[in-house]
Amino acid sequence: MAACIIVSPFGIQTESFPAGTHFAGSHLRFGTLADQHKARIVDYLDLRGEERLSRLVRQKPAFVISHNDIAALRALTDTVAKTDYALQLHEYALGAFQSASVPMASFHFDGEDVTHHAFDARNAGFRPEQEHTLGAEVWDRQLAYLEFLYTKSHQGPLAKLAVNRLCRALRSGATDDGLIDLAIGLEALVITKVEIKFQFALNHSLIGSDDAADRAVTFALLKGLYDARSTIVHGGAPAPADVRKIDAAKASWSQLQSIAQRSLTYYLLYCSQHESKGWADHMVQLALGGARVQLEEPQ
């Protein structure tokens, strides 16, 4: 069998999976695992004392990704990196439309055996009764977004770091660690060495909307996030005003997640239509009243 990466969304109830086989692009399939894939995953996990994870994944359908045919993964020469990044893309694609992080695991299959796996250790205590229920709309939207990430992410050199940190933020939720990772993920998309907080808030507010009122709300939220992040990473006992900023950022968690998803999506759209080296100049043009890129280039 061909080499591939297998991603198991084992944290989703079986009843939430659509029947049959589904495709997100020409090189990514979701459906029942082939017996050989299933057997090799079970052998690999059991030998490493991961019988519990083995039980969680063996009964569920999974994604099978032909990674040699996908530029975003082909660009990574290390199979461990490919396995990790595939897991992050899947977690983030679903997390963009689901209120909580869904436990998943990924496996690299070299054509004969499973050689690596990636798994968030924080889900080690996951139990079947904690499985997430997904609506059909959530499933369809994440499939479409997953295809978008796979086909576009290699065109944006800043995407890998951003996805890594945004995925970590998704896993941590509205915590101190989550705020730090969310801010780093957003900061990765801002190319500047001066007035970082201002540029951070301004650029992402310009990316997300053409409406001045919406931009003002986003600008304020992101300034608050950056202040909260700075307070947390500098350590020590925060002043009452700083505590309020951290609490406000946590209370705005879902809005901040939406801002991050819009910014990442916009960055990848831009890079798919223009040279990525023009990204910083594009941010300047937006600030001067230039138009945002659209889903499709104007004819």
Image (spheres, helix red, strand yellow):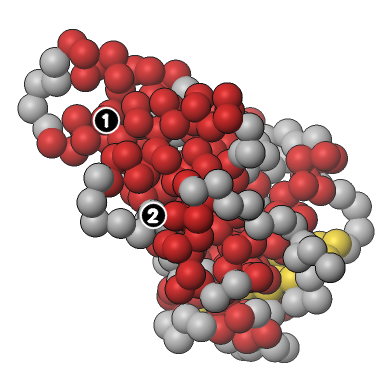
**242 with respect to 271 (left or right):** left
Amino acid under disc 1 = Asp
Please, which residue is most extreme toward the front here? 288
Residue pictured at 58% horizontal, 24% vertical:
213
> For this rendering, which residue is in front, 246 or 284?
284
**264 with respect to 20 (left or right):** left
> Please, is residue 77 above or below residue 17 in the view?
below
Give residue 148's quadrant in the image: bottom right
Amino acid under disc 2 = Val
Give residue 250's quadrant in the image: top left
Residue pictured at 72% horizontal, 88% vertical:
1
Q: Can I make out residue 47 in this image?
A: no
Upstream in sequence: badge 1 or badge 2: 2
Q: Residue 36 at what x, y percent from top left?
A: 72, 78
Tag 2 residue: 190
Q: Residue 117 at what x, y percent from top left?
A: 49, 68
Please, which residue is most extreme toward the top here? 240
Q: Secondary structure at mark 1?
A: helix
Disc number for residue 227: 1
Residue pictured at 86% horizontal, 49% vertical:
18
Residue pictured at 84% horizontal, 68% vertical:
299
Q: Residue 195 at what x, y percent from top left?
A: 25, 45
Q: What's the distance in space between the residues labelled 1 and 2, CA to CA?
A: 16 Å
Q: Residue 278 at what x, y percent from top left?
A: 48, 70
**285 with respect to 131 (left or right):** left
Instruction: Judge the density around disc 2: few (<14), some (14-19), many (≥20) Cα neighbours within 10 Å.
Output: many
Please, which residue is most extreme toward the left here? 236
> For this rendering, which residue is in front, 164 or 256?
256
Q: Secondary structure at mark 2?
A: loop
Q: Can I make out residue 136 in this image?
A: yes
